[in-house]
Image (spheres, grey):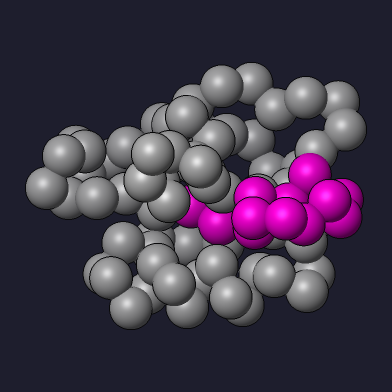
Amino acid sequence: MSIFDQLSGGGQPMPAETMCSRKGCRAAAAWQVRWNNPKIHTPERRKIWLACEDHRGWLEDYLKLRGLWRDTQPLDTPVEGS
């Protein structure tokens, strides 16, 4: 199983209580870290990892280093194109 399998939202609806996508974190999510892999996703597609306040920067940095990060939105922002 890859890190993308472990952390991706997979385009599934968000549960009523959301949790940070960082491995081992059980904190409530406050952010949608939106990304896509241009080698396998269409340009408008967005995958979503959920982030708590403490792990938002870590998840963004991980994706930015790989050229996959697109934007970060508050958790309550409507999901489109996932």
The answer to if 28 sits in the magenta stretch is yes
> What residue lies at 64% left-to-right and 21% top-to-bottom?
13
> The C terminus lies in which quarter of the figure?
top left
Q: How far across and how far down the image is residue 12, in percent?
A: 56, 22
Q: In screen coordinates, is 76 left or right of 82?
A: right
Q: Which residues are magenta?
A: 19-34
Query: Looking at the image, which is closer to me, 59 or 43?
Result: 59
Query: Looking at the image, which is closer to me, 80 or 8?
Result: 8
Please determine whether, in this image, residue 54 is positioned above or below residue 45. below
Q: How far across and how far down the image is residue 2, in percent?
A: 37, 46
Query: Looking at the image, which is closer to me, 81 or 63?
Result: 63
> What residue lies at 64% left-to-right and 55% top-to-bottom?
23
**Residue 31 visible, this angle:** no
> What residue lies at 51% left-to-right and 71% top-to-bottom?
60
Q: How far across and how far down the image is residue 51, in percent?
A: 69, 58
The answer to if 68 sits in the magenta stretch is no
Q: How far across and how far down the image is residue 18, in percent?
A: 80, 38
Residue 73 lies in what quarter of the image? Answer: bottom right
> The N terminus lies in which quarter of the figure?
top left
> What residue lies at 32% left-to-right and 37% top-to-bottom?
45
Please determine whether, in this image, residue 28 is positioned above or below residue 18. below
Kindly report the secondary structure that dominates the magenta region of the rendered protein. loop
